Image: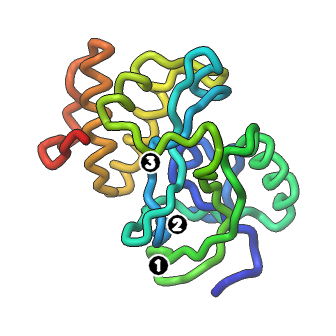
Amino acid sequence: MVATSLWVFGYGSLLWNPGFKPAESVVARLEGFHRSFCMWSIHHRGSEEAPGLVLALDVAPDAGCDGVAFRVEDAEADAVLAMLRERELISSAYYEDMVPLKLADGREVMALAYIINQDHVQYCGDLTLERQAQVIATAVGGRGPNTEYLFNTAAHLQQMGVDDPDMAWLVARVRALVGLPPHPGFNVQKSVAK
């Protein structure tokens, strides 16, 4: 394991808005978790009155999550960590942990990740995809519409070559709900609404 620098695992909005300039970005996989719209957003993509949904790493022993490992410049590690904590730990719905990642180039690193606390009131791991789509289509928070969060994350996963059927289904459904034409780049044939 390479352990000299701070690495950060991006699986949601960090993919397209890390908030810092990484020294290195490498596609990576985390085993034992899956990416899921399982966290009510009452700040960034929704409000307390009308919560939105954001992605979180949710424990799933037989699953894996593909994302990006960002290596932080050593001189910027403290500042980046402070910025990430302010952004990601706005409530105690996420907890911070170091997780083992397998990088696409064969390296293995320990990386900082933000994982959902299943005991927190903002955890909502049992929502159907249809319910997720209904929420995402209308919610707006301090960082903008929930649709922007979904569309940007899905586009970046697609650019990485990550096949995420649930994400593709959500993009198609949310686009229909808000009156946008189907996105030609997403294959929803393999996706099944849950």
Q: Is residue 78 left or right of residue 87?
A: right
The nearer-to-camera label among 3 and 1 is: 3
Residue 145, given in percent of the width and then of the height, sits at: 52, 21
The nearer-to-camera label among 3 and 2 is: 3
Above or below, 91 against 145 in this view is: below
Q: Secondary structure at mark 1?
A: loop
Q: Which residue is mark 2?
A: 26
* Displayed quadrant of residue 191: top left
Q: Is label 2 in contact with label 1 (beta carbons under 8 Å)?
A: yes
Residue 40, given in percent of the width and then of the height, sits at: 56, 33
Q: Is residue 8 left or right of residue 173?
A: right
Among the two numbered marks 3 and 2 on one chain, the one whose residue lies closer to the N terminus: 2
Q: In the image, which disc is placed on residue 36?
A: 3
Residue at 27%, 12% (x, y): give it: 179
Amino acid of disc 2:
Val
Q: Quadrant of the N terminus?
A: bottom right
* Displayed quadrant of residue 72: bottom right
Q: Residues within 10 Å of mark 2 (few under 14, many from 20)?
A: some
Q: CA distance from mark 3 to mark 1?
A: 26 Å
Among the two numbered marks 2 and 1 on one chain, the one whose residue lies closer to the N terminus: 2
Q: CA distance from mark 2 to mark 1?
A: 8 Å
Q: Which residue is mark 1?
A: 105
